[in-house]
Amino acid sequence: MTVTIKDVAARAGVSPKTVSRVLNGEAYVRDAVREAVLGAIEALSYRPNVFARSLSSARSYLIGLFLDDPTWSGYAAAMQRGALHRCRERHYHLVVELVDIDKPGFEDEMLASIAALHLDGVILTAPVCRHDGLLSRLEAARLPYVRVSPGENPLRSAAVDIDETRAASDITRHLIALGHRDIAFIEGIPTHAATPKRRAGFEAAMHEAGLPVDPRRIVGGDFTVGGGRVAGEALLSSSDVPSAIFASNDDMALGAMAVASQRGIAVPEQLSIAGFDDSYSARIAWPTITTIRQPIMEMAATAVDILVDRQYRETMQDPTWSRVLPHELILRESTAPAPARPFR
Amino acid sequence: MTVTIKDVAARAGVSPKTVSRVLNGEAYVRDAVREAVLGAIEALSYRPNVFARSLSSARSYLIGLFLDDPTWSGYAAAMQRGALHRCRERHYHLVVELVDIDKPGFEDEMLASIAALHLDGVILTAPVCRHDGLLSRLEAARLPYVRVSPGENPLRSAAVDIDETRAASDITRHLIALGHRDIAFIEGIPTHAATPKRRAGFEAAMHEAGLPVDPRRIVGGDFTVGGGRVAGEALLSSSDVPSAIFASNDDMALGAMAVASQRGIAVPEQLSIAGFDDSYSARIAWPTITTIRQPIMEMAATAVDILVDRQYRETMQDPTWSRVLPHELILRESTAPAPARPFR
DNA sequence: GTGAAAGCGCTAACAA
DNA sequence: TTGTTAGCGCTTTCAC
């Protein structure tokens, strides 16, 4: 019925152990033998039984992806896609688990699931990897993990990230290059690790261009559309309006844009608006929003690569494996040259 | 190191097989013994090894969830959450796979993945389950599946769905109850199974109220924000404007709303707009959009329940297991009583 | 370089 | 109602 390693061995005229060697890329197999085995595998279209394998080897060929807040449009999906593709290439499987870090006891649930599936390693995404208690427990269980966009404790394990600060200064520089001098900044929620970095990038680009950073042009936000609306009101309700707004994420950019539209301020003719994340909001907005894209799929794939590597698993989270991937400035319709003179 | 069934057996003073019986809810175990075993399991916080189990029983305790949803509209997230929770309760695990039904050969990829993991069954979501070729191959592989919102071929397998027609007429009735008589309808993309149902529901409610369905008040759409914008232009550019618009989904409602806002038509004072899906768009819109919510998490959970049932798996997709779950009308800010007289 | 034996942790089949 | 025996398909010793 099902093709087993024995069938392959018989056809190739070798022992099961030799087939196993070929399967696992071990040394000490003559090329001729290896070819023969490979041929038999192909001919029989043999697939190793994952369960038998895992049972005898303590490896599961399973990697866990832990996500919190999958409503975060697009991010979770891209993460999943990137990890999934790389897993396929590496002959691993991906088990996605949704966690709710605000729920007490979520760590127990996670660890139970990890234990039951004997995961070979886990990928922790932005919100999850800020949970110190969880990291400690993973370390105690000697379970390799890689964090994506960790924000803090860069040396605690390998991590995959972009240079948030640089990205924020890149988009700010784009606005400056368009002739904007009076640029407002909408900040993210303070608890988020990206918040200070994006602000630092904004300020760095302003200073670099010799432009003042007016504290009244910096308003708080919370990464939501509603928060962007409130910030937009603060910035656009007086007669003294900036010529550009850089919001720390797309949702807030969308909120600010809605306020501009209500107040009859034309985007981008009178006011340029930039966001960050390249989320769904940035693409459905009208006009579409200039933003920064993280290479999320590549980040996830890189995390898989690190996790799959025997070395990494043996050295247990050696942070020297960390990688910083390039971001991309996405130019859309919401930014344009600064108006020759302020509109009011 | 790891707790095995033998440890539990030893602690409870029974044989491994008896523990196995308790684990699998088999009969022929005295209550006292069962209690003792359960106690030992608890005390040792024992988790059965999925691989050992699968290897000896031909069951994997793994369920696959196949999604094709690049935009991750929250639908997929809810689906995943619902399925995951129920899987936990039933002591199953969920393997999420993203598929791209437009990619040639996607079925092979899916079946390879199914074979490698020996999935006990799969849940097919809306776009995936319309693919006849795939269904045939699953049937050939004798792999149980349940479809969620299948649209077509209701008798081909068990399916979990809502009553789309009824939902569309419910929201139409809500508009009528608000005094609207001149209601426009934006249709979905013709290839989507929900499209004719939602339209039928709209027309049924109109007829029921003795209101005419003017063909000029029905415009085509494609379920995107851009499509909603185009439809909105068609409906709102003349001087003869309806007092309400029911768009077949939230994204199109959002597009139409943007057009209204541009044209200075106040929503909901001058124009009521309703959507369908309760998506992210409906909540970030301003004003927020009145819509229909499907109980997506419950639908996914129900699909798991059906799949886990031994009977269903043995009878191979008996359609009598199908279930229709109740939808919900979500009243938000975008609908209000019809204006006393047309605005222009 | 290659193979034989043993066993991973569990459950099916059969006894008792 | 419970226990015993024999594998599931693979990888790990450790021989040869």
Image (cartoon, coloured by chain):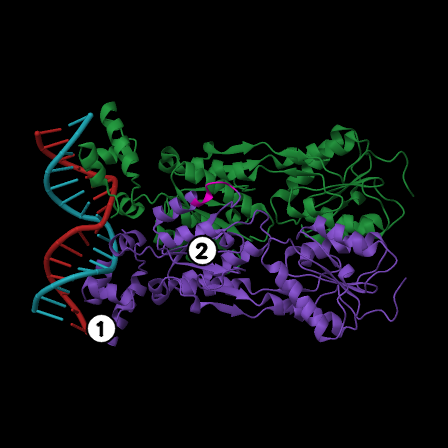
Chain colours: A green, B purple, C cyan, D red
Residue A297 visible? The answer is yes
Q: Which residues are magenta?
A: B103-107
- What's the magenta bit mostly, secondary-structure-wise? loop
Image coords of residue B243 (percent x, y): 81, 65
Label 2, residues with CA under 10 Å away: few <14, some 14-19, many ≥20: some
Residue ID for mark 1: B28
Residue at mark 2 shares a chain with residue at mark 1: no
Percent position (x, y) of residue B193? 58, 58
Q: Residue at x 55, y 52 (%)?
A: A70
Q: Chain of mark 1?
A: B
How crowded pointer 1 is (Cα within 10 Å; few <14, some 14-19, many 20+) is rated as few
Q: Position of residue B211 (x, y in %)?
A: 76, 72
Query: Residue drawn at (78%, 59%), measured in percent from left and top?
Result: B216
Numbered circle sitting on residue A107: 2
Image check: A188 left or right of A91? right
Expressed as whole percent of the image width and height from the top left, the position of residue A41 reads: 28, 35
Where disc 2 sits, the SS reads: helix
Query: In the figure, A99 relative to A336: above or below?
Result: below
Amino acid type at mark 2:
Glu
